[in-house]
Image (cartoon, grey):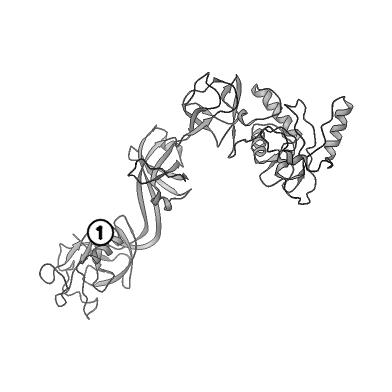
Amino acid sequence: MVRVGHRGGDRPDRVDGPPGRRRRIRVATGAAVAALLVAGSAAVALSGGGFGDGSGTRTAASDPSARTARVIRTDLSNSRTLEGTLGHGAATTVRGGGEGRITWLPSSGTTVTRGKTLYRVDDRPVPVLYGDLPLYRTLRAVNTVGRDVRVLADNLLALGYAIGPQPAPGRTVVPMPAGPGPRSEPGSGSEDQPAGRPEKNTAGRNDAPDGKPSPEGKNGSAGGTASAEGTASAGKNASAGQSAPAAPVSAPVRVEQGDAVLTTDLINAVKRWQTAIGAPATGVVDPHDVVVLTGPMRVESLQAQVGDPADGELLKATATGKAVTVPVEAGDAGGIARDQHVTVHLPDDSTAAGRVASVSTAAEAEGDDSAPKVDVLVTFEDASKVKRFDAGPVQVEFVGETRRHVLAVPVTALLALREGGYGVQLSRGRLIAVTTGLFAKGQVEVSGAGLAEGARVVVAS
């Protein structure tokens, strides 16, 4: 409430009722207070006597019915509460690829983790790998360099396979030409050599979909020198009656931060892994041989059935943990950020601490007349708090600005002053001009000369 009054000797310009009467106006925020004043609400006129004598005002001492409240020192936070849905978060669509037909699918509710089979094509397993980048090309040729190779290497290492040493960032390697098909015994040439900071040759990364070097690569350093290990391996293969690998035809490629190199050791680890999961031990990995997910997933629903072609939508998967999806109007999402702390109000009136996991960047409108909305995904800091709930509506409280250790009074203690600004009336009648700060949950931050913690101020009835 904003209590608006005047002293008998100084009548406001517009007052309904006799002199000395005060109007009390309810407000929710500082913006509402200002709006009411602009609209023509009466204001307090303080004469030359200043704030000291309190003549013409009601005090707690003279009027026992006057309500008072104590000035407190506290932390204030403004917040907003939005409706959300408890579940497992947004679903990810898993699509198959390549030729063949689906021969096995998991049931809904199944949890899949790294290395486990997600589905089978022509009775071959398609396992799960973790990563942020899908495999986008066939990984076959020795010394292929890229972040997709890093995904493969990191997953094999996490599954317990020895992958051998990797060239450090800043070194260069010479990609070897890929054979016409799966190689039963890959060549060598995995050693790196000192970098002279040559130009990065993307053709040498073996970006062609079939794993063969691009035509540009053939125009590179055809007469380049292979690494020492590659030369030695070629000699061993020749002495064993095997044909030595062809000389490198690609220019050297620099290993960047986040890259990995498809070394001989890594290819051999791929073969051991393929044998363990029951796949042909070719040492070659095609994009449709694996499914790269961001982490453990739960199969939400199936989009295909056994016998369907493998190159379509197969299933939808969600995160394994409980989460809340909150649709927020795109224009209001600016104050919500990843890792922001929130409070989730659960169906049984209990609360659980949460954190913003993601804010979608694609805004969608539910209808022609509705505002576009983005989805905010909230995860829980303690999963045990929500394990008894399956799904349902919840409320999520987003905390905005916080002011710590400030003086605060009820909003209903504010007086709108005629000359501008606000004041509060002490219980014994003295008026004190105050500066307002944050408004939150019926309280307002105040500061002013003569105002102290513990003082009592008059509030609107």
Residue 176 location (% of width, % of height): 77, 36
Q: Would you place residue 204 above or below residue 43 in this image? A: above
Residue 74 location (% of width, % of height): 36, 59
Point out the image quarter for the C terminus: bottom left
Q: Quadrant of residue 280?
A: top right
- Count of numbered circles on the image: 1
Residue 56 location (% of width, % of height): 15, 73
Look at mark 1 in the image and give the residue it sits on: 27
Is 234 left or right of 333, judged from the image as shown? right
Looking at the picture, tell me which residue is in the foreground, 437 or 256. Answer: 256
Looking at the picture, tell me which residue is in the foreground, 69 or 174. Answer: 174
Q: Amino acid at mark 1?
A: Val
Q: Quadrant of residue 88?
A: top left
Q: Quadrant of residue 376?
A: top left
Q: Would you place residue 26 above or below residue 15 in this image? A: above
- The residue lying furthest to the left in this view is 18
The residue under the point 85% across, 39% down is: 228
Residue 218 visible, this orientation: yes
Residue 171 location (% of width, % of height): 75, 47
Around disc 1, counting alpha carbons within 10 Å, would you say few (fewer than 14), some (14 to 19), or many (20 or more)?
A: some
Point out the image quarter for the N terminus: bottom left
The secondary element bearing badge 1 is classed as loop
The residue under the point 58% across, 28% down is: 97
Residue 319 visible, this orientation: no
- The residue lying furthest to the bottom in this view is 48
Is 378 left or right of 122, judged from the image as shown? left
Is 37 left or right of 174, judged from the image as shown? left
Looking at the picture, tell me which residue is in the foreground, 325 or 422. Answer: 325
